[in-house]
Image (spheres, coloured by chain):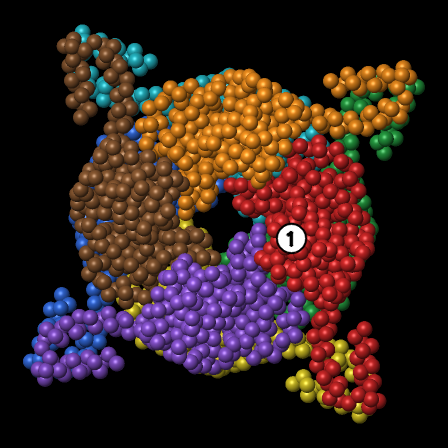
Chain colours: A purple, B green, C red, D cyan, E yellow, F orange, G blue, H brown
Amino acid sequence: MTPEILRELLTAVQHGTMDIDAALDRLKVLPYEILEDATVDHHRSLRQGFPEVVMGEGKDASQISSIVERIAAVGANVLVTRVDEEKAHRVLVDHPRMEHNPRARTMTFIQREIQIVGRGTILVISAGTSDIPVAEEALVTARMMGNLTEHMYDVGVAGLHRLLGQKEKLMSASALVVVAGMEGALPSVVGGLVARPIIAVPTSVGYGASLQGLAALLGMLNSCAAGVTVVNIDNGFGAGYAASLINRL
Amino acid sequence: MTPEILRELLTAVQHGTMDIDAALDRLKVLPYEILEDATVDHHRSLRQGFPEVVMGEGKDASQISSIVERIAAVGANVLVTRVDEEKAHRVLVDHPRMEHNPRARTMTFIQREIQIVGRGTILVISAGTSDIPVAEEALVTARMMGNLTEHMYDVGVAGLHRLLGQKEKLMSASALVVVAGMEGALPSVVGGLVARPIIAVPTSVGYGASLQGLAALLGMLNSCAAGVTVVNIDNGFGAGYAASLINRL
Amino acid sequence: MTPEILRELLTAVQHGTMDIDAALDRLKVLPYEILEDATVDHHRSLRQGFPEVVMGEGKDASQISSIVERIAAVGANVLVTRVDEEKAHRVLVDHPRMEHNPRARTMTFIQREIQIVGRGTILVISAGTSDIPVAEEALVTARMMGNLTEHMYDVGVAGLHRLLGQKEKLMSASALVVVAGMEGALPSVVGGLVARPIIAVPTSVGYGASLQGLAALLGMLNSCAAGVTVVNIDNGFGAGYAASLINRL
Amino acid sequence: MTPEILRELLTAVQHGTMDIDAALDRLKVLPYEILEDATVDHHRSLRQGFPEVVMGEGKDASQISSIVERIAAVGANVLVTRVDEEKAHRVLVDHPRMEHNPRARTMTFIQREIQIVGRGTILVISAGTSDIPVAEEALVTARMMGNLTEHMYDVGVAGLHRLLGQKEKLMSASALVVVAGMEGALPSVVGGLVARPIIAVPTSVGYGASLQGLAALLGMLNSCAAGVTVVNIDNGFGAGYAASLINRL
Amino acid sequence: MTPEILRELLTAVQHGTMDIDAALDRLKVLPYEILEDATVDHHRSLRQGFPEVVMGEGKDASQISSIVERIAAVGANVLVTRVDEEKAHRVLVDHPRMEHNPRARTMTFIQREIQIVGRGTILVISAGTSDIPVAEEALVTARMMGNLTEHMYDVGVAGLHRLLGQKEKLMSASALVVVAGMEGALPSVVGGLVARPIIAVPTSVGYGASLQGLAALLGMLNSCAAGVTVVNIDNGFGAGYAASLINRL
Amino acid sequence: MTPEILRELLTAVQHGTMDIDAALDRLKVLPYEILEDATVDHHRSLRQGFPEVVMGEGKDASQISSIVERIAAVGANVLVTRVDEEKAHRVLVDHPRMEHNPRARTMTFIQREIQIVGRGTILVISAGTSDIPVAEEALVTARMMGNLTEHMYDVGVAGLHRLLGQKEKLMSASALVVVAGMEGALPSVVGGLVARPIIAVPTSVGYGASLQGLAALLGMLNSCAAGVTVVNIDNGFGAGYAASLINRL
Amino acid sequence: MTPEILRELLTAVQHGTMDIDAALDRLKVLPYEILEDATVDHHRSLRQGFPEVVMGEGKDASQISSIVERIAAVGANVLVTRVDEEKAHRVLVDHPRMEHNPRARTMTFIQREIQIVGRGTILVISAGTSDIPVAEEALVTARMMGNLTEHMYDVGVAGLHRLLGQKEKLMSASALVVVAGMEGALPSVVGGLVARPIIAVPTSVGYGASLQGLAALLGMLNSCAAGVTVVNIDNGFGAGYAASLINRL
Amino acid sequence: MTPEILRELLTAVQHGTMDIDAALDRLKVLPYEILEDATVDHHRSLRQGFPEVVMGEGKDASQISSIVERIAAVGANVLVTRVDEEKAHRVLVDHPRMEHNPRARTMTFIQREIQIVGRGTILVISAGTSDIPVAEEALVTARMMGNLTEHMYDVGVAGLHRLLGQKEKLMSASALVVVAGMEGALPSVVGGLVARPIIAVPTSVGYGASLQGLAALLGMLNSCAAGVTVVNIDNGFGAGYAASLINRL
């Protein structure tokens, strides 16, 4: 802890075991270390079984490989998101121990066993079959961050019985990620049924007036069900991450 | 019928009971009469117990009064939409026999008894209390056009049991008008429950990202339930009118 | 009927022919069956000669083939929408009995003869040659759902005589689907001529300020002709489906 | 003409009747005079019977009065646009000779008789009654700029017979201004009937998805009829001005 | 519990203490009770010290008064949001025991002592002075729902030292609500400092390109800090509610 | 002329040389012929040396070839717009006599010598080198429609001297087409220099906040220079066509 | 300077004149002081003759008065922006020494003589008369921050000679603020004439497609003249401030 | 200088060594030369060690090569922006002496040694790794225009310590270019730390609600830090150019 370090330093100066210039050099970098400390608190939590995350989109296979290389060297688990099939296969040549989840478009490198740090279960729900990749990204993220997860796919609002038929699963989750494209109505319906934090993820699934997911995004922001919060379009990772923070409390 | 009129005219010419110039004058206006005939078909249907409609917004009380005056003179029923309280009271001074519905913001002048021309019942559903004025406008329109109507208010998607608790009413309608603001999810849920034509009406109810009803509009256009069609924001009249056309079949 | 089932069950309990645990097991699933019943009403209607529908966009040929396989096994007719030429040819290898309509970008599998369940004729109108694929999608959908259909193509508002020259066809339809891109003005003109339900379909045909069909969509939502309702951009299927619901009344 | 002025100046220098410093002073301002000449060409044309124009919106009555004062002093005709009733009455106190047109929201001060400089007739057409103020602004502008005008109001596309019933008027115009709100379809229909330059004016008439006239604007920009050009929403003045330039050729 | 109720009912039928028609009547409403049960779970949690919430916007003082009347009758606490000064004073005439918080634009009626049900502290942070009303709405909501709260106002990103100077408060919160208008950058900065769930609330504070809060909303949805979720513009209540759900875990 | 035809017909009926049924058959089609006549007026003018126009975008080479085939058969001149290099070369195989202008992306088939029907010269101005294809499309269109043309390229507003250095050309045009992307400011500057009709064409040239030409479009619609009218983004053809209508007066 | 302070502190500890706990207390706040130092650098510069700035919009007269009170107490100059007439008059009652500039909608309190710290002259240019308030806000801001200023109003691009006629003023400025509404073309033209930093300010002047200043904003962001940077719509203060930072270099 | 040239000319006329027609010819082109002089002032500054700039996007390799050829012939330095790898390699075949910077996507041809004309250092900061290409474009531009530069990459607002750890570099810049995508918050944070002109560059980095850089653009325009001005999305060149103009003062 910083206060202890400071006391030691001052005692050393008082006792003459450290001269003033050495103390000065040490102190000069201190403010940033303290700031760093603020952010390191963030990093530390990440390291408590949490993976380092690499956004695969916009990076080629060799860039991904070398980043994974570097992270893996410090012993952390790695989660790569948004890797298409071809890129994944190229990365697998360099890192054959990585696991590739084509539905989630993720690659994971688990060097240290993931410890369950979440108190309850994170439930990921998706409306249509085309929304599944985003839902899976959330699911993989939540698992990599030490959570028990459940999922419930293809339960769109035009077929309510499929959703209501799984009442127990709905009721027993401690945080829910609800993924939907098109009109994005599912989070409102789920939010009317359970009194738990719901993270809504709009997807770019749809055409025409879906405006690449904007319609779903606007729908979710205007949800008539309180307790619904929203992340960016297709941001399964962000939803899984936020749900993990909630579940870790 | 036009062919008959033409045959009479030609016969008159053949028999010399009408001279050529008189026939010519008559024929000159014919094309437009025939076109008129096309549109008159439309007007005729309107007159089969249907009201003449006056959009009250953008007109002052005296303008409304004199239009009503003119229509009433030909014996037609009149429906005035979007009249606020103050304007309505002024119009009532001139037309004390008119009925003012403040919730629907309508005024009606029923000179001829409305005959029921619709085959089934038109059901108007609304999500929140603030959506009721638009729903009522649809309801009044449907009634003025000769339909039996039912309504079901305050059945938003965040409280499904209120909607599902009235299954019979839902199932027995021949056409449904579903009114909702905010995320506009209700038509999708209703569309998943009944296989009847659904006219969705987005409302400008909401704030911020509701964008004055655009979010609800986009949501409804992207509905995952087939059979849903959409009208302009707050257009209760248009929905009631379209439902009447459907029910009249 | 559910009440009968319940009465039988209770009588069996009363008579001791069913023990309480068995009755309990039966009752536990009842609520969802009743809900299911609500939605099954929807499915049932779909099965009355109606096809199962597969959205081909976003699915590859093998995915489509296996879905068709599964549906075909239960004896239903199948309608696949938005299949491009190449995909269609691959699916045809697996399902040589399917019919491919390249203009409509549809594939159909008709196992049971389609019964005409619509009362009148559905008329599909389109403005420009580029709008025809969307119009054809509506037409194929309406036919697969048991309707008599007519069509009238290339009758844009800049050449009114082509539209007005087919007055009889216009007047005799019981529901109309009107397809147009660019400024989307055709539904207003048609809506001024016939007093029938009109479903307007904006298309993404155009460039620049057409904003991928948004201009046409907005135009149709603001139609000055009452009775016009609107579906999503390029949503020929949705329009054909809604017209079928209207015509089935 | 500038070359003559230059020759005179140079001759004066050659002859010694003007010294070099005086010539230099004169030449220094010359380039801007020449530029001015370019723009003066514009002003000159404006003065050939054309009025000076004052945008009344955003100016109070006293500002308008004093601008009119200043222009009137040089003997030009004045056109003030976008003056509401109250403002107009205040300006009339200062300028009782001005004419106020409340429908067009214009005031005009005609000091010199307007000479007809246009070759043909400018026809102003409007779709709905609410579009008339914008149409009248165009009409007044065209008249003030020396044109013969005709108008045709309330001929929306949902009632084609009203438009087609006045074929002669349509065919005989040399330039047309077509004013419409809501879906803005009228210019396309008119453009399909006459082969003359058409200036389309979208109006802010409408609600909801009309987006304060943007829907009509987009519709007109996407017109399927060639020969249609567009001005800003509610810009009756601009349309009347452009039509005058066209008619003056 | 439903199974127990069912067993009792069946036993009564078996034992002949309840006849079949009475059982049938009871069972008929069961499905909806079970559904209700799903939603009641939601309501129940609301009642565990949670208030009933009334959206004051769009309701006049007498409407608010009578709704409060009705809720108060059942003994629940009441939270009214978005009441302006004038409306509040009128409501206070009817309900003098209510507390009016003008900064938060809320009124509260606390009949039962609020029990602390949250595990940690909810920290509400706001960027500018104009954002405070929205922040206060979140704060009041969180308190009414049984949470300990802290706040930190006027710590915009252009003056980082004010934010960083309160590191302890930042680090000790279990959930954070971060309120900002204009560019909406604060949640990203806070999200980089603490590893806790952050609910970002964009406000309509700003002008021009802030587009009534859309700029802040977009900024927050694109936050580069993971763990940030977003609610609608100015939705302080929604943020306070979601933070309460998170903190209650 | 129709009246003459009618008189002949009626005389024939009167004289008994035509029986009533024959007259009736003839009269039945008359209205549409008259309508046709209205539109034929349009077509006729098109044929007075004007080309038939084919939009090449969205059509493949064989479709273009066969349309050209069909038009060419009736002896009309043909203008194909928006043909890329590859498509053009394929069409040239079928129609080696066509002329391909790669800069304008047009193909033309001139069977009948183009007669000059315009009174003055149409001047096409463009701002940047990337705007030239759109400018050339306007130029080719204007020439095919029988106009003398001039052009002035690369005279953007950031280099005014290039524009002002060609004052004579500017001043002598009877109609101007001004093409610009990015901020679209050129029409305003030109409109301040000449008092002639100006048709502004926004182009999709630009990136980021140019929004595919929307920025230029909006700029032009808001031009502070009166007399500027606007066509759709990249619509060189429409501008050339409208300029031709203007010049033909 | 921080290092000196640290050395003193350490020397005091070394010499025993400060005990460790006192040193520790001192060091604990150091990081924030250093951060503060970073931002104070900013504040310091503000105080070098720079005013404290108060945004008057959204604050009532009494709030403004008390803020001015507080700032005035520390002896700083004060600039209040966006104060309307009525508000200004109320503030003047409390602060009669303040100067009110109604055109700029500013109030200033100059306690210490403003020292000229800018190297050259800041020139503020505006396009139309309605743009002057924003231009004046920039001008007042620049003066309050210690700059010599010039202005040039009503020099829109449709009247180039007015701009070009003042070449000397244009050429002699060290930084330019260019204010324009409608199409926002002026900065591009000015940017083509002078090679100095140009800050473009779009204004909300215009109507219809000006979209409350968005058209001008987009135009300026797409300027074809390099060296143009842009601030928010109507942000005269921001432009004056940025110009002052540039001129101070 | 023009006045000298004019005096010589007039003197020659006075002395008879130049006849009037020759003088007239000379004077006729003068206005444009003077205008040219206005713009040449701009060009001249560009030539003071400044490069000629070629926008590589939308031009193919051979077009770039020939433009470079032409510029190089007059001895100027050349900067080509937005050249992808493939294009660059083709251009290098023609111009092997050019330097290709793949990260900045630039090519430069330095024929004359670049002289440092800037007074201080231009610091280019970027938020994420994906923003680096735009940052590099700004950096290369600033260097080519004769400035000392520094850069600081990957200092996003979610990791403040990385930014604050380089306080000296931040404080010592005379102008800053700050590049960021996603929420675009970095310029506000930097603007709160340094009192220097900051040019903010939004990038198209992001997905979904980033709207291709619009979110970042809006964020920057709404920056709560005064002194921030903004250029178009991805416009690294424009930012580097504007920073050079600022630094040259």
The spot of residue A39 in percent (x, y) is: 31, 71
Q: Residue furthest bottom?
A: E15
Q: Which residue is mark 1?
A: C88
From the top left corner, tell me how far across and down residue F112 is, in percent: 59, 19
Query: What residue appears at the point 63 percent right and 65 percent down from the top-left corner?
Result: A157
Give the image location of residue H136, x and y in percent: 29, 52
Q: Residue at x 33, y 35 (%)?
A: H66
Front in this rendered view, residue D2 or C114: C114
Q: How many marks?
A: 1
How packed mark 1 is, by other alpha carbons closer than 10 Å (few <14, some 14-19, many 20 or more), is many
**Mark 1: secondary structure:** helix
Q: Amino acid at mark 1?
A: Ala
* Residue depicted at 79% across the width and 55% down the height: C114
Camera sees residue B58:
no
Q: Chain of mark 1?
A: C
Tell whether C47 sits left or right of G104: right
Query: Would you identify the image quadrant in which residue G188 lies?
Result: top left
